[in-house]
C-alpha cells in the first residue's frame, strides 16, 4: 500500500510506527553511521507485535515468563532501542538514543546483550539471532514441562532478514525447530528483496516459504506495512503447533528517496533526505521529539502486561518454598552447594582407583554425578554422543513427545547446537553443555565467539583434542584450535591431564557466572597423575607444580592434557641422569594468566630451562616459555608446526617427535 | 530389493560392486579402524556411475576435461580408494589399499587431496565436499564459456550423506548452485536414514527433495541398489539444465549383521562379521583378492574414456600457440611474467603520490592493474562488494546469462564462498579470491582450514580488520582473528601497513603455488609509509626495518598494518627525547618465521627493549618480543585483551590505549 493510504486508513497505528521511524532517522543521522533501512521497513510489524501481541512489562523486564523478542538482523538495532525507549524501559533513556553508537553508550551499533534490559541476545553476525532463538524456544518448552504452564508459557518472536536466511546456520536452526515442533517460535522474514550488493536476485532465488515448509514449519505471508494483515498473520501463527515463518513483504527505507534500494540499507544522514522522509510520514516534530500524547500511548503498551505479570507472581508465590528456592537458584545460575562435595568425592575415588581412562570418559564420570544434583543441566551432542560421552543415564531425550528430556540429539549441526546452547542459557533457568570433536568447533566459531562476548557460561565438550585421535587423520586432528580458543577473550579453555583434573575442570566450568568454558578432552586413555587426594581444586589456579624437582632444579617441563604424562616420563629420564626437573601441569592458561605475578613466579621461577610439551602448535606457549614478554631464559617447545597425519595414535606421536625422549633431549640441549 | 534378487537379476553388476565392498571390508578390518557402512551402501551407485557415465581415463588422471567425482561423505574413503585401484590409477596400488589408514600410506582415513590422483578434494568435515563441488561446477561453466565446449564440457558428481545435508554450509551451496543453474552438478544423496547417534529421525525430519527444489534444483529418487533405477536417474540428471539431487534409498552396511543400524556406520572388524557379509554377497575370494577376469573388467572401465581424451587432445592441439601457452600457464597456476613489473610500477606510483587510503582501497588499486593481465582471476564477495573493494571494472558478473563473468555475488554466505573458491582452484585454470569482513571469516573457518591443508593458493580478502572499523562494534571487530589465522599451518596472513605493502602482498599471494593467503585490510585511511621506491618486495621477508634508530639503538618498535603508522609516530616522540628507536614493519609473521636466523637477528637484534603494537590480542607476538622461545630482553605489548567497543574509530583506539603516546611511554617504562 502507499504511505498516504496507510496513514489515512490507520492513523493511530501509523503515528506509533512513525515514532519508531523518526527516532531511527534521527539517531543514525546524529551518529552519522548505522542502518536506517530496516527500522523504516519493519516499524509496522514491530508496532503491531508490541501493541497487540507481545507479552511483556517494561517495568519488570526480567519477568521470566515474558515473550522474548530477538532482532536477528541486528544492524537494525535502532528499531529495538526505539521500542525500548517508547515502551518505557527504565535504562533506555532518550539520552542513550541520542548517543547511538558512541563510546560508553548502551546503544551500540548492534544489540549487545547486557547493555540494556530488553536486549535478549547479542546479534549482528547474520543468522545468529534466529539460530539462538531456537534455544530460547527449546528452553520455554522444557521449562513449561518442568514448572507448569502457569510459570512458563510464552513465545519467542524473531525479526530476520535475507542475510539471516542465507547464512547456513539458519538451515540448521530451521531444521532443528521444525523437527522439534517448536510451536512457540515465530519468525518474521523481512522480505524486502534488497541486500548490500543490490537486489537479492543477484545472489539468491530461494523460495523461502517452500524451504521452511520442507522442514515442517507453518508458513504464511503478509503485507509488512498493513497492520491488519500483520495482525492476522501473528494471530494465526500463535495458533499453530509448529514453528511459523511469516514472510512479510516490506519496503526497505520506506518513504525515503532510497526506498527499495541497496543505498537504503545503510545510513541515511543527509539532513534533506531525513527531513523529506519525515515529511512523507507527515511527521512534523523536531529531532528526537515524540509528542507527549503519542509517547503516553506507547508507555501504556509498555505496561499492558502488568496484569499478566501480577497473575504470574501469584502462581509463583503459590509454589512450595523448596520449589521457589530451586527456581531462584537455577534462575540465578548458581551451582548447588553440594556440587563441591560431590566433586571432591569423585576426585577421591579416582585418586584411589587411579584408572587409565580417556579424559572424555572421565568427563562422563563427572557428568554422571553432576547431572543428578543439577536438574538445570541440558546436555547434547552434534551426533557424536557415544564419542563425546555427553549422555548420562538419567537425562532422557528432549523431543516433542518428551519435553522433560534433558538431552538433545542436535544432529550434525555444530553451529546450530552452539547457537541453541546460547539461547538455552540466555532464556534463563538452564545450564547447557554440548559436545563435538574439537576440530569441528570450527563450524561453530561465530556462536562460540558470541557466547564469550555475551559472557554466558555455557560448556563446550570438545573431545578428540589432538593427533591422539589417530587414524581419522588431519581433517579431524586439531592443531591450531587450542591457540584459537585460548586467544578468544573471556573463554576458558580447560585441557585436563587426567580424571582428577577433568572433575576439577567441570566444577570450575559449572561455577562460572560470566564465562563460557571449553573442555578439551582426549580420545585416548591417559594414566591418573594426581595420585594424592587434595580437597583443593588445583585446576582453579590454571597451572601448578605437579612434580617437584629432586635436587637442584635445572629444568621445568610444562604441559597440558595428554602431554602431561609425557612430561612426567621425561622427568623420570632426566632425574635418572641427575637433572632436577619440575613438572608443571597447565590445564588452563587463561586462569593461570589471571593469577598474581607472585604465584606465577612461584610456579615458573627463573633460572631453570623451560620446555613446553603440547600436541599442537606453539602459539600461546611463548609467553610462559619466555618468562612473560621477554626477560626469558633458555626454552624450547615440543609440539607441532604442521597439520596432522592419518595413522595410529602412537605412530602419529612418534612421527612428530612428541615423546618423553625428545622432551628430555630438548632439555639437555638447552642446559 | 533383496541381495539375492539383485545378484540373480544383475550378476555382472553385482560382482563389480561386490569387489568394491570386499575391498572396503578387508581394508577396514586390516586397519581395525574406518567406516565400512558407506562403501557397502553406495557401491552400486558408484559402479553404475563409473561403468556407464563417468568420463575419465585412469591412465591420464590429470585430463582437464574429466568428470569430477567428489566424495563429500569422506569417511567412506575406502569406496574411493577401491574405485581408483580397480579402474587402474597407477599410484593406487593394492599395497596402498592394504595399508589403509597407516603412516605414510596415501590411503588416509579421509580422502586427502594430493595423496593420489583421482582424489579431487579433501573431505571428511561434513558438508565440505558438496560445498566445494559448487566451485568445480562454476569453474567448468566459466571455462567452457571461455575456451569452448570442445575443451571444457564435463560433469561434477557428488556423493553426500545425511551429515553433509545437515551442515549449514550445504544450504549455502544448494542456494548458490540453484541460483546459478549449475546443470553440470549432480548430487547423490545416500538416503540410508542412519547417523552415528541412531536413526536420522532422532534429529531431522527435513524433506530433502522439497528443500533442494525450493532452491531451484531438479530432484528425483532412485533405488540405490538397483542398477537400472540408478542408471535411469543419472541419465535424466545429465539431461537437466539445472543442478540435480538424486535421493538414493540405500541400506547402510548392506548385507552385514549391522545393516540399517548406527553400528553399521563405523568399522566392521569382527572376522566372522566380515566373512558372513562376504558370504551374503556370494564372494568366495580371500582378503584383498580380486579375480583376474573381474579386475580386467574394472580396468576396461578405467580406460573407456581414452577415446574421448584422445579427441580432446586433438581439439587442444588445434588451439593457437598463444592460446596453448595461456592454457598451460593458467593450468599450471603460474602468475604471468609481467606481474612483477606491473606491481613495481604501481608501487612507484603510490610512493610518488603518497596517498592516504585504507588498505582495502589500496587492494582495489592493486586488483585494477592485476585483473587485466590475469584473465584467470575470479573475484567475489559475500555481499560486501563495496566494502571489500573486490570488484574491478573489467570483470563482468558471473551468472547463468554471463558465464564469462569473472566476479561472483556470493550473497551472505562466507562459508559457501570459501568452499566454492577452493573448488574453483582445485578444478584448475582459475585463481579465485573472495572478500568479507575479517570477523566473519569465522563463518568460513572449516573451508579456510581445508584450503590450507590442501595447499591451494586461494586469496581471502578480509577487510575491516580491527577496532578501526568503529561504530559497528564488538560483533564486527576482530580481536583474536589474527592469532587464529596465523596459528593455522600453511596459511600466510598479510597485514600491510600502506598501499606499497598491499601491492607487495598481492604479488606474493598470486605467486604462491601451495599456500592460501589472507589479506587483512583496514577500513580506515592510512598514510603511505614507504616513501622511497624499492624494486625489491620487502614484504617477502615478512618483516623488515622501516625506520632505523638515530643515535644509539635503545628501542625496537614492531607493528603490522594500521598500527605501523602509530609506531612511526611513537618513534618521533622517542627520538625527540634522544631515545634511538628502530621501527620494524611486520606484514607477515609467517614469512618472517621462514627467514634464516641471521636475517631475523638483523631485524630484531638483542639489547634494545622491544614493544609490539597491534590492535588485537597479544597471542603470537611473544615469540618476537622474547627473542624467540626465551633468551629475551625487556619487552611490552600495546594492544587488546578484551573484545572491542562500538564507537568512532579514534575513540576506540584511545579507549584501549592503542596510541603513539602509550607506546612511547611503554618503551620508557622498560628502559
Image (cartoon, coloured by chain):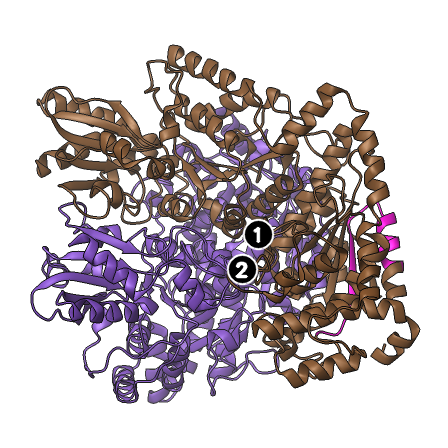
Chain colours: A purple, B brown
Front-most of A412 and B20? B20
Of all chains, the one bearing label 2 is A
Quarter occupied by residue B561: top left
Question: Residues under labels 1 and 2: Cα distance?
Answer: 11 Å
Residue B290 horizontal/vertical position (percent): 76, 68
Residue B590 horizontal/vertical position (percent): 37, 39
* Crowd rating for badge 1 (residues with CA inside 10 Å; few <14, some 14–19, many 20+): many
The residue that appears at 39% across and 58% down in the rendered structure is A656
Residue identifier under label 1: A160
Q: Is residue A528 something that shows in the picture?
A: yes
Name the side, left or right, on which B366 lies relative to B638. Answer: right
Locate the C terminus of chain A by quadrant: bottom left
| Same chain check for tags 1 and 2 | yes
Front-most of A224 and B84? B84
Which portion, as a residue range, is magenta?
A: B232-252
Q: Secondary structure at mark 1?
A: strand
Name the side, left or right, on which B422 lies relative to B148. Answer: left
Residue identifier under label 2: A131
Judge depth for marks 1 and 2 and give the one in front.
2
Say if the magenta span includes residue B244: yes
Residue A434 horizontal/vertical position (percent): 46, 70
Front-most of B97 and A77? B97
* Crowd rating for badge 2 (residues with CA inside 10 Å; few <14, some 14–19, many 20+): many
Quarter occupied by residue A302: bottom left
Say if the magenta span includes residue B671: no
The residue that appears at 21% across and 73% down in the rendered structure is A538
Instruction: Please say if B374 is above or below A311.
Output: above
Which residue reaches farthest front? B292
The residue that appears at 38% across and 25% down in the rendered structure is B525
Which residue reaches farthest top? B352
Amino acid at each position: 500500500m502507499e504511505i498516504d493510504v496507510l496513514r489515512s486508513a490507520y492513523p493511530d497505528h501509523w503515528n506509533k510506527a512513525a515514532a519508531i521511524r523518526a527516532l531511527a532517522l534521527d539517531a543514525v543521522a546524529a551518529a552519522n553511521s548505522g542502518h536506517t533501512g530496516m527500522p523504516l521497513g519493519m516499524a509496522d510489524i514491530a508496532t503491531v507485535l508490541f501493541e497487540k501481541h507481545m507479552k511483556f512489562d517494561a517495568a519488570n523486564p526480567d519477568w521470566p515468563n515474558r515473550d522474548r523478542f530477538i532482532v536477528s538482523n541486528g544492524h537494525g538495532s535502532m528499531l529495538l532501542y526505539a521500542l525500548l525507549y517508547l515502551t518505557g524501559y527504565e535504562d533506555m533513556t532518550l539520552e542513550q538514543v541520542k548517543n547511538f553508537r558512541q563510546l560508553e553508550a548502551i546503544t551500540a551499533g548492534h544489540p549487545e546483550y547486557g547493555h540494556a534490559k530488553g536486549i535478549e541476545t547479542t546479534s549482528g553476525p547474520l543468522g545468529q539471532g534466529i539460530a539462538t532463538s531456537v534455544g530460547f524456544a527449546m528452553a520455554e518448552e522444557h521449562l513449561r514441562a518442568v514448572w507448569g504452564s502457569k510459570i512458563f508459557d510464552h513465545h519467542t518472536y524473531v525479526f530476520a532478514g535475507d542475510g539471516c536466511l542465507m547464512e547456513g546456520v539458519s538451515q540448521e536452526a530451521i531444521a532443528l525447530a521444525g523437527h522439534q515442533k517448536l510451536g512457540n517460535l515465530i519468525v518474521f522474514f523481512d522480505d524486502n528483496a534488497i541486500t548490500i550488493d543490490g537486489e537479492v536476485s543477484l545472489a539468491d532465488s530461494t523460495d523461502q516459504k517452500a524451504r521452511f515448509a520442507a522442514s515442517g514449519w507453518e508458513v504464511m505471508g503478509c503485507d509488512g506495512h498493513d497492520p491488519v494483515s500483520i495482525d492476522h498473520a501473528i494471530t494465526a501463527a500463535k495458533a499453530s503447533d509448529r514453528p511459523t515463518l511469516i514472510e512479510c513483504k516490506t519496503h526497505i527505507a520506506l518513504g525515503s528517496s532510497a526506498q527499495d534500494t541497496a543505498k537504503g540499507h545503510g545510513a541515511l544522514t543527509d539532513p534533506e533526505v531525513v527531513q523529506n522522509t519525515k515529511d512523507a510520514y507527515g511527521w512534523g516534530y523536531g529531532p528526537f521529539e515524540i509528542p507527549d500524547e503519542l509517547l503516553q500511548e506507547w508507555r501504556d503498551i509498555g505496561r499492558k502486561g502488568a496484569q499478566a505479570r501480577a497473575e504470574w507472581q501469584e502462581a509463583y508465590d503459590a509454589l512450595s518454598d523448596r520449589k521457589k528456592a530451586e527456581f531462584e537458584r537455577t534462575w540465578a545460575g548458581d551451582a548447588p552447594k553440594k556440587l563441591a562435595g560431590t566433586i571432591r568425592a569423585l576426585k577421591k575415588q579416582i585418586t584411589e582407583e587411579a584408572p587409565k581412562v580417556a579424559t572424555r570418559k572421565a568427563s562422563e564420570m563427572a557428568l554422571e554425578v553432576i547431572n543428578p544434583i543439577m536438574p538445570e543441566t541440558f546436555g547434547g551432542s552434534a551426533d557424536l554422543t557415544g564419542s563425546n560421552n555427553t549422555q548420562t543415564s538419567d537425562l532422557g531425550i528432549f523431543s516433542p513427545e518428551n519435553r522433560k528430556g534433558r538431552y538433545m540429539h542436535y544432529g550434525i549441526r555444530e553451529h546450530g547446537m552452539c547457537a541453541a546452547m546460547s539461547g538455552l542459557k540466555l532464556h534463563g533457568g538452564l545450564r547447557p553443555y554440548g559436545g563435538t570433536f574439537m576440530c569441528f568447533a570450527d563450524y561453530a566459531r561465530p556462536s562460540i565467539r558470541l557466547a564469550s562476548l555475551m559472557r554466558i557460561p555455557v560448556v563446550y565438550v570438545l573431545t578428540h583434542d589432538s593427533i591422539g585421535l589417530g587414524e581419522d587423520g588431519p581433517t579431524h586432528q586439531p592443531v591450531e584450535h587450542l591457540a584459537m580458543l585460548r586467544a578468544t577473550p573471556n573463554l576458558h579453555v580447560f585441557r585436563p591431564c587426567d580424571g582428577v583434573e577433568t572433575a576439577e575442570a567441570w566444577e570450575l566450568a559449572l561455577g562460572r557466572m560470566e564465562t563460557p568454558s571449553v573442555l578439551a578432552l582426549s580420545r585416548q586413555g591417559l594414566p591418573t597423575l594426581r595420585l594424592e587426594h587434595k580437597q583443593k581444586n588445583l585446576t582453579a589456579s590454571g597451572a601448578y607444580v605437579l612434580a617437584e624437582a629432586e635436587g637442584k632444579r635445572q629444568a621445568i617441563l610444562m604441559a597440558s592434557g595428554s602431554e602431561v604424562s609425557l612430561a612426567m616420563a621425561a622427568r623420570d629420564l632426566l632425574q635418572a641422569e641427575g637433572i632436577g626437573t619440575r613438572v608443571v601441569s597447565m590445564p588452563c592458561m587463561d586462569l593461570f594468566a589471571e593469577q598474581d605475578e607472585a604465584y606465577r613466579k612461584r610456579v615458573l621461577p627463573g633460572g631453570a630451562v623451560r620446555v613446553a610439551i603440547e600436541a599442537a602448535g606453539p602459539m600461546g606457549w611463548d609467553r610462559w616459555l619466555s618468562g612473560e614478554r621477554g626477560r626469558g631464559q633458555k626454552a624450547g617447545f615440543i609440539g607441532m608446526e604442521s597439520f596432522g597425519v592419518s595413522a595410529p595414535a602412537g605412530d602419529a606421536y612418534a612421527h612428530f617427535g612428541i615423546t618423553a625422549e625428545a622432551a628430555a633431549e630438548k632439555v639437555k640441549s638447552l642446559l
